[in-house]
Image (cartoon, rainbow, N blue to C red):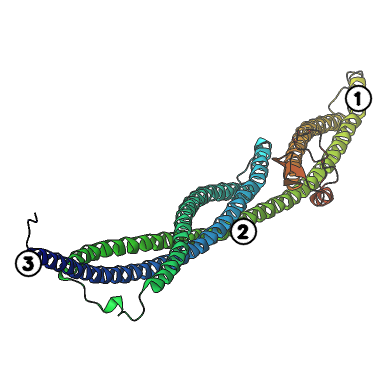
Amino acid sequence: MSMHTTQEWAQSAQYNMYQAQSAHRKAMDQQDRSSRAHGEVMTENMGMYSELHNSLEHKVKTSQRLVEKLQHRAHSVENSLQHTRQTLAKLEEALIAKEAPLTLCTWRMEQRERRPLREQVRDTAEVCLEVEKATLVDAQRKLKDFIKKTKATIHALETKLEELRHDIQVKTQALSVDELCLRTTSRSLETVSDRSTFMRPSGSPSYASRPASQARRRTQGAQAARHEVSVHESARNEVLRQQEALRLNQSAVHREQAAKELRDEAVKLIQRTQRSAEEAMQKSQKSMKERVNENQHVRRRLEQELRETCNQINMTKSTIHDTKTQIKSLEEPMELTSTCASWRKQRAAREHIQDPVTTTLQEHQMTLLRCHEDLRQHHQNEKSVLQDLQEKKEQLKEDLREKTCALHIDLNCLTHEATCLNGKPSPAISRQQLPKAMKVDPTFVPNPGHAMIMQLPLTAR
């Protein structure tokens, strides 16, 4: 037997249909909301795709510009570093070039210290050699100081170049990653754009024109606030990154400018020290030549005086010989007067008187004795004069010998030039100066050690 009526049966069917229609309306509302959500999601997704693409493109261009600028600066720093190293090599060459002249100057001073004691005067040549040595030592000190500064500058440039290379490497790696992301984003954007166009129903309104729900707007507002903070932070970080790159570039520029100023000053120092060293050497050469000429002039005077002394000695010897002859010539008259006086004593007592003959004989004897005494005194004086002349002759010879020794020392200094033998600075005989020295004195023999020979010729040609 049935338990429901026909009305209940109809009401139950009517209720089921009402429930189904209500579910239909809910489904259609949900479909409409989902469609709007799909459109909003696609719009936001496309917007973010575009924003990401633009951000990546801007970042890639900025990174490329920074890398290009840093690479240009690194290349400039490399050139500056190369030029500074070349300047360092020139400074070291200039420092080494001062060794040979300093060695020659010191050697000349040592050689001139070997002059005889009488010739060790503080002449112009000695003063000029001391000035030359001081000039060379001062030039070496200045060059060494500049070499230290140049090495420090090279180290600073190398450090800055390493910083640039490291920053370029880091930015290049980041740029390659951003370029990869940009390419991937471009492909993904094209794919998503094609897909969104295919999935959008024909005749349906644009997703961007449909208003978002209130809840979604509230969510988007909160996200926008957080996004603004993030955008501000990221923009600040990007600005700091670019400023850091610019500071690195500017610091490299300052280092290059300082290196260029140092190079210019180093070139001026090299020229200045070279010029001062050459001037000091020329003054030393000139002063030694003047000293040689002065020595030659004095030696000629000594030779003339020596010749006159020798002539005077010969004349004195001749006078001594004449005096001896005169003394000897008095022997016969004295003997005659003595003989006559002795004979006249034998006269008879009456004739033994003081007559004129006796007086004359006595006067003759007195005259002969006086003449003999005078001649003897002259003879003694002549011998004393002869001894004095001989002493003066020996003094002149010794003085001439010492001046010849000093002349040969100065000529030996002039005939040597600054050279490097087996990598070591040492004086060597100059083929140009040796003939000039031989013209001054043909007996001159150059010797690096200059062991002076005491038996030197007493001529100044």
The residue furthest front is 1
Eye-nearest disc, 2 or 3: 3
Which amino acid type is shown beneath numbered disc 3? Answer: Gln
| Secondary structure type for disc 3 | helix
The x, y position of residue 233, in whole percent, is 27, 61
* Residue at the (23%, 66%) spot, across then down: 228
Marks 3 and 1, Cα distance to the nearest angstrom? 218 Å
Q: Quadrant of the N terminus?
A: bottom left
Res 104 → quadrant: top right
Eye-nearest disc, 3 or 1: 3
Q: Specify whether residue 461 is in view.
A: no
Numbered mark located on residue 31 in the image: none
Residue occupied by mark 2: 275
Task: Work out whether 280 lies above or below 369.
Answer: below
Task: Work out whether 195 lies above or below 114.
Answer: below
Which amino acid type is shown beneath numbered disc 1? Answer: Glu
Marks 2 and 3, Cα distance to the nearest angstrom? 132 Å
Res 237 → quadrant: bottom left
* Residue at the (36%, 63%) spot, across then down: 243
Residue occupied by mark 3: 7
Q: Specify whether residue 118 is in view.
A: yes
